[in-house]
Amino acid sequence: MKTNEIPYYKTDQFSKLIIDYINEDEKIEPFISQFPRLENFQLQIDQKINHSVDRDLLVKVLRKQNLDISLSQSTINNISSLTNKSTFTITTGHQLCLFTGPLYFIYKIISVINLTNKLKKRYAHYDFVPVFWMASEDHDLEEINHINLFGNRIEWDSYQTGSVGNMELNNIDKVLSKIKEILGEKIEASNILEILESCYKEGYSLAYATRKIVNNIFGKYGLVIIDGNDVAMKEKLIPLIKKDVIEQGFVETIKSCSDSLGKNYKVQAFVRDINFFKLTAKERELITCASHLDDIIQNPENFSPNVLLRPLYQEMILPNIAYIGGPSEVAYWMQLRTAFKQENIPFPILVLRNSAILLNEKQYNNFINLGFSLDELFLDEVDLHKIYVKRQDSYKGFDQEIREIESIYDRILERTKESSIQYSVRAEKQKQIRSFRKLENKFFKLDKNNHAVALKRITKLKENLFPKKSLQERYDNFIPFYLKDGENFIEILINELNPLASNFVILLIK
């Protein structure tokens, strides 16, 4: 197994806020609790251990939600351990992407599992439980109703509305048939098809199917799956619903924090006066005016927090000390630091999920044999073409000639101190250099034609590893890799990814 790590800033894929957070810039400190260093988790535990969480309710809800799911003994033990005040959770969450969606869905859960294991080794007198929070109340169906598989977009056609978690998997057999057609009759395809067909069935809800597939892949590692859309848990949310929907008691607090963050960074999430949706059987509608108090008290399950209040809800319910998220999640959590202070809820340590590019052996050898190092993988295709051509022995650039021109004009400049003449000399110098660069570009185009085959290989590699000019992890599904390595694919990721690393990983999958 070969891995290569590249600092995030060299990938040109992450915001200034994320780079500064990784580098522990002091400008970030007002918006977080602790930087994600292993030694800082004791400080977080000290805060959370004194925060009141209804552990008995949490365990009761988890057992009820997972009643029809075949849990591993490790997960069963983890759920039971949550009644102990010395047990804490490490959490990530995501939308209910079809068949887990893009690869970073998998990376988030891997990061949670790995951080849990790392904390268990460092703080053996505590226990830690990995948790996946299902965003079942989300209503953006278009964001989660498809996967990209071997360059094919496979979409689940559904015209249901409202919370995606409650949507029934009508016509899912057509989607499974398309996947089967793409995978073919190979023996390797049977295992993954068996998983998909057992988890996604007509009559299942999307929430249930997502719970099943995540448990199927990660249950052996003790992962606990929770759905926040629960009547009993939302009764705990009533004070927040009242404060937000009736009093608009969060808008100024969150806006003030967001404005402070915005002095140096781009703010991720828009702040609203009211941050709850109203749930009905078919809709999830943004609340725009105050609701009746009786409705909130009697029907809290009909109220759904938006992206800015869901974190507070989560941290009220869970004995959580760390939240693992992608770049945008880390950014919008930072808008909430003062809201957490206002409600006396400990703000968790924010951990950026692992990011990786997976290369097979052929892709790796092609890139290296073209004369590149893995550090150059993130360069633009046009830049890679230029670098390749200019590194060939046949390439003759005009650098030497341009240096000679600069030397001639520099000697001319030494002959006079007259500013107007010096200005003319410098202008003529730049004109000559531009002319030579234009000629150089014409020669370069001729050289490009001589290396057309190699340049096409570069283009194909970039298209495969950066589909649609996006990171692989934001586009490709896990199925092609699971197809090749089966459960060992997850083991490879667990062994190779460090949850507290501050580098982008390039991983060779043999």
Image (spheres, rainbow, N blue to C red):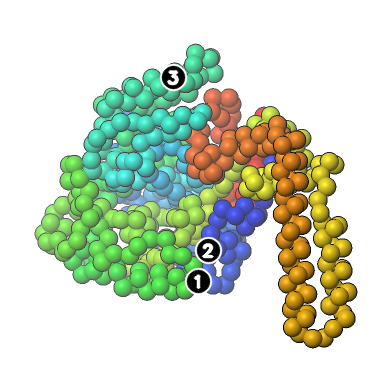
| Image label count | 3
- Disc 3 to disc 2, C-alpha distance: 42 Å
For badge 1, the amino acid type reads Asn
Which residue matches tag 2? 17
Tell me which amino acid carries mark 3: Lys
Mark 1 is surrounded, within 10 Å at the Cα level, by few (under 14), some (14 to 19) or many (20 or more) other residues, namely: few
Residue at 31 percent of width and 35 percent of height: 206
Circles 3 and 2 in contact, beta carbons < 8 Å: no
Q: Position of residue 427 (x, y in %)?
A: 73, 72
Crowd around label 3: few <14 · some 14–19 · many ≥20 (10 Å): some
- Please name whichever residue, 252 or 225, is drawn nearer the observer in this view of the structure: 252
- Relative to 350, is 396 on the left or the right? right
What type is the residue that disc 2 sits on?
A: Leu
Residue 430, placed above or below residue 56: below
Residue 139: x percent and y percent? 29, 45
Q: Please give the residue where the numbered disc 3 appears in the rendered image.
A: 180
Q: Residue at x 44, y 70 (%)?
A: 262
Q: Nearer the viewer, residue 208 or 123?
A: 208
The image quadrant where one finds the N terminus is top right
* Sequence order check, earlier mark of 1 and 2: 2
Name the spot of residue 75 as percent of width and height, x first.
44, 38
Element under disc 3: helix
How far apart marks 1 and 3 lie (CA) works out to 49 Å
Check the image and report above or below for 339 versus 201: below
Task: For label 2, count other residues whose C-alpha is less than 10 Å away and answer few (under 14), some (14-19) or many (20+).
Answer: many
Q: Secondary structure under badge 2?
A: helix
Q: Are marks 1 and 2 in contact (CB under 8 Å)?
A: yes
> In the image, residue 120 lies at what x, y percent?
56, 49
Taking the spot 44% from the left edge, 18% from the top edge, the residue there is 181
Please give the residue where the numbered disc 1 appears in the rendered image.
264
- Label 1, secondary structure: give it: loop
First in residue order: circle 3 vs circle 2: 2
